[in-house]
Image (tube, grey):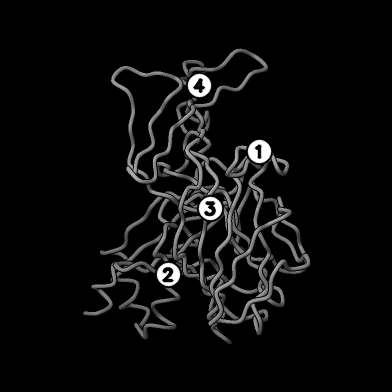
Amino acid sequence: MTIHTFTPSHYFNVLATVPPVLRLAPGDAVHTTTVDAHGIDAERRQVTPPGNPMTGPFFVEGAEPGDTLVVHLDAITPNRTYGWSGVMLAPNVVDPSFVAELPWPPAGTRRRGEWHVDVAAGTATLRDPVVPGGMVLPLAPMLGCFGVAPADGEAISTATSGPQGGNMDYRGFVAGVTVYFPVFAPGALFFLGDGHAVQGAGEIAGTGVEISCDVRFTVDLQKGRRIAWPRGETASHILTAGNARPLDQALQHATTELARWLQEEYGLSPIHAQTLLGQAVDYEVGNVFDPAYTMICKLEKRWLAA
């Protein structure tokens, strides 16, 4: 195992088959940094155009189409005190009759919330706009956008998501989680970025508390393990991510992937797996703002131990 320290000098607004910034062996770890969704770094400098700029890609030796890339999210730490967010619900998450009542900014302007992020205290404090009684939220740093190069040489915007991962904005992608991606290109070509200090389910205001981060991750490789959609594992759950629009299609992808996982790799019969899911499954909304929505399908590991 080698621990690499990588300082990015350029970023990507697409997931694509492009020259890698670093070559890794399975088992290697990387310390690196990400900029925020608008391309602002730890020093609050605009260093790249906005649109979820990604650090990477990282080439994993031996990874080939049909394999599975394993990414352990070891640490995600905001590296500045300034965060920003949306301050209005996205029009698509409320009734059409309520859209006119949203706190729209003056025409031609866009208002942001400004937050003070205190990593030592574990808090994000809203500074502007000022609200009665103030607003202090506990930190839960996560990666909103990360994934691998898509199939067939495609270049897919970091505004959206798909089988390759991408802008899933699932608030459960925190430190300590292991994420599995299908490999579509030699080396897998892993990208990461779009750090959030905290975010509610669904990213229903169009952002989390957007911030740059220091990230440590470790890669591994599962040869010949073919999956269709991103998967994840926590201390308590296994989970799958479906990315599509409409939302029911994202749910279908996630549910199918978890059913296949139980049947193909845990050895459950179709009736066993599907009856268990029917009575014990959990769902979470990852994102309902981006061009593709994200649904998470989860199952507690205790049912598998039984």
Residue 198 picture quarter: top left
State which quarter of the image contains the C terminus. bottom left
Q: Report the amino acid beneath label 2.
A: Leu
Q: Give me the C-alpha separation between circle 1 and circle 3.
A: 26 Å
Residue name at image x 71 percent, y 77 percent: 186
> Looking at the image, is mark 4 or mark 3 earlier in the sequence?
4
Q: Which residue is mark 4?
A: 99
Q: Report the amino acid beneath label 1.
A: Arg
Q: Which residue is mark 2?
A: 258
Left or right of residue 137: residue 194 = right
Q: Which residue is mark 3?
A: 168
Q: Report the amino acid beneath label 4.
A: Val
Q: Give me the C-alpha separation between circle 1 and circle 4.
A: 34 Å
Residue name at image x 40 percent, y 80 percent: 263
> Looking at the image, is mark 1 or mark 4 earlier in the sequence?
1
Instruction: Relative to 39, say whether 183 is above or below.
Output: below
Residue 38 picture quarter: top right
Crowding at dot 4, Cα within 10 Å, few <14 / some 14-19 / many 20+, comes out as some
Residue at the far left in the pictured view: 306
- Image location (x, y in percent) of residue 295: 46, 54
Crowding at dot 1, Cα within 10 Å, few <14 / some 14-19 / many 20+, comes out as few
Crowding at dot 3, Cα within 10 Å, few <14 / some 14-19 / many 20+, comes out as many
Q: Which residue is mark 1?
A: 45
